[in-house]
Image (tube, rainbow, N blue to C red):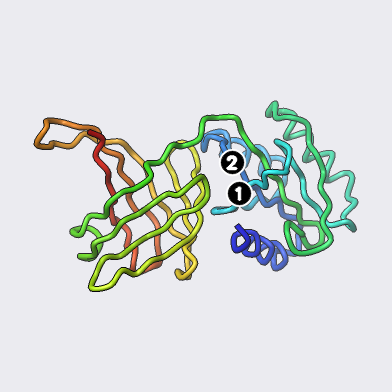
Amino acid sequence: MKRLVSSLALLVITGCASPTVFLTTERLPEKDKQELVKALSESGFTVKTTSGVRVPEEFPSVVVATNPANENLEFFDKLEQVIRKKDYPPVTYQKFYQQKHYYKGRNVGLYIRGDAEELVLPPVLRGSEETCNGQRMILEFKDKTEMSLDIEDEEITSYTGSYQSVLPDTVYANFEDMKEPVTFKFSQVEVKTYAGMKTADKLVVTKSENAVLPVGCEFMIINY
């Protein structure tokens, strides 16, 4: 989490000179998220969506984070109008002096936590050697934020990291020893087994700049 927040802080500190709304969502369906982005853009806001960043647990459902010197009341009133039209809960403002969730200049952070059911991921999946560059791999989700990847060779190489699930079927992962985040797509498929047709949980890498996890690499667990 600390690494993700630090990445977000760096992003906003080096952001554009014009005011930008950095949107972070959780448990919000992708359709609703895109509709909000469209509404904000049509109202004249510059919007950038974050990935791999969680809404802090202590935040209420809708938060606008600003730096203490940002008192552009007209901007905030216009922003609230868009949010109210989407029937989200009332906006709460959080001001930060530095580091976590600090937004430079007139940039702001908009955090929205939805109430949709979370994507339920299987605890363990095995990688396909055929699609994962011949590697034998195990992907494990340890709780709602932590994950690990083990590569089985003469010795086991382990990568630990954190993840965020985005409804309806996307998972963003950040591994500590990988330079770039990885995006997975989740699905349930029917597979033929010795016990007949069974449902399997499947994760496929859809975006990656890391050789360890190439695009198209598949992980699966069969539910017997």
Is residue 27 rendered to the left or right of residue 55? left
Determine the residue located farthest toward the front in the rendered image: 155
Please name the residue that numbered disc 2 is placed on: 26
Residue at x-position 30% and y-position 40%: 201
Residue 138 coordinates in the image, percent (x, y): 31, 56
Residue 191 appears at what percent x and percent y?
18, 37
Instruction: Give the residue type at disc 1.
Output: Arg
Quarter of the rendering containing residue 79: top right
Which element type, helix, strand or loop, lies under badge 2?
strand
Are the residues flagged by discs 1 and 2 in contact, CB closer than 8 Å?
yes
Residue 202 image position (x, y, % from top left)? 30, 43
Q: Residue 151 placed where, x, y %? A: 30, 65
Q: Residues within 10 Å of mark 2 (few under 14, many from 20)?
A: many
Q: Which of 209 and 15 is in front in this view?
A: 209
Of all residues, the one furthest to the left in this rendering is 194
Residue 82, by quadrant, is: top right
Ranked by sequence position, the earlier of labels 1 and 2 is: 2
- For the C terminus, the image quarter is top left
Q: Which of 40 and 200 is in front in this view?
A: 200
Q: Name the residue under label 1.
A: 54
In the image, taking residue 69 as reference, residue 111 lies left or right, namely left
